[in-house]
Amino acid sequence: MTAPDTKDSMATKSPGKRLRGKNATGFICAGIFVGMIGLSYAAVPLYNIFCRVTGYAGTTQIAYAAPTQILDRTMTIRFDANVAHQMPWDFKPVENTMGVKVGEPSIAFYRATNHSDRTVTGTASFNVSPSKAGSYFSKIECFCFTEQILGPGETIDMPVTFFVDPDIAGDKNLDNVETITLSYTFFEVEEETG
């Protein structure tokens, strides 16, 4: 009795194992590819949720009611307004600065005028600086939550109702913050055709 040739038996088993290995590698690569595409689509909404929860990047908080506690600490709120390139609007704050007590609900107005000969729909993005104050700056009502439509030559005053959360007093990293800037940028919304 002779021993089977181990080279022949290895040669007959190896192609199947290699084929299964190649298939597994292909499935793993395809899975990673599909996963990366899924993550790229989910990145923006997940980042927005993260920013809203943490106040990261100067993202403000949304509140449904004003706090009941008003502190003696006064903050200067500075208002900034910008329009995107080729947006045919003039957009500016009615008041450039406002002094508010921490916890006190306040209202500010921004004014927009459409200088074009057509109806323009706009939407605003916003942020707060310094960014570390974003989690303490809360908006109750804001024009940035909805699209704004202005006809040719039309002007509108848009309110934003806000407060600085009294919890800011407990954050030692913000003891030196006396001024918070609320900044908006308006972008034209492209109309979908068809």
Image: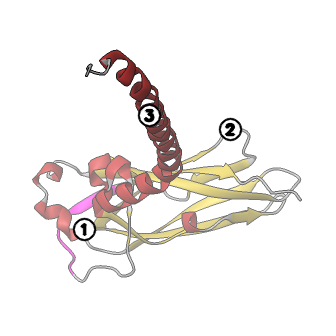
Q: What residue is at 26 percent from the left and 68 percent from the top? A: 165
Q: Give the distance between the C-alpha atoms of the residues marked 1 and 3, in whole angstroms.
A: 58 Å
Relative height, residue 67 to residue 166 (above, below): below
Residue 37, percent from left and from top: 53, 44
Q: Nearer the viewer, mark 1 or mark 3?
A: 3
- 157 in the magenta segment: no
Q: Is residue 183 visible?
A: no
Q: Is residue 39 visible?
A: yes
Residue carrying label 1: 102
**194 or 9: nearer the viewer:** 9
7 or 97, which is in the foreground? 7
* Residue beneath disc 2: 85
Front-lying residue, 134 or 17: 17
Provide the residue designation for mark 3: 25
Give the mark nearest the N terminus, 2 or 3.
3
Residue range highlighted in magenta: 69-76
| Residue 158: mark in rendering | none
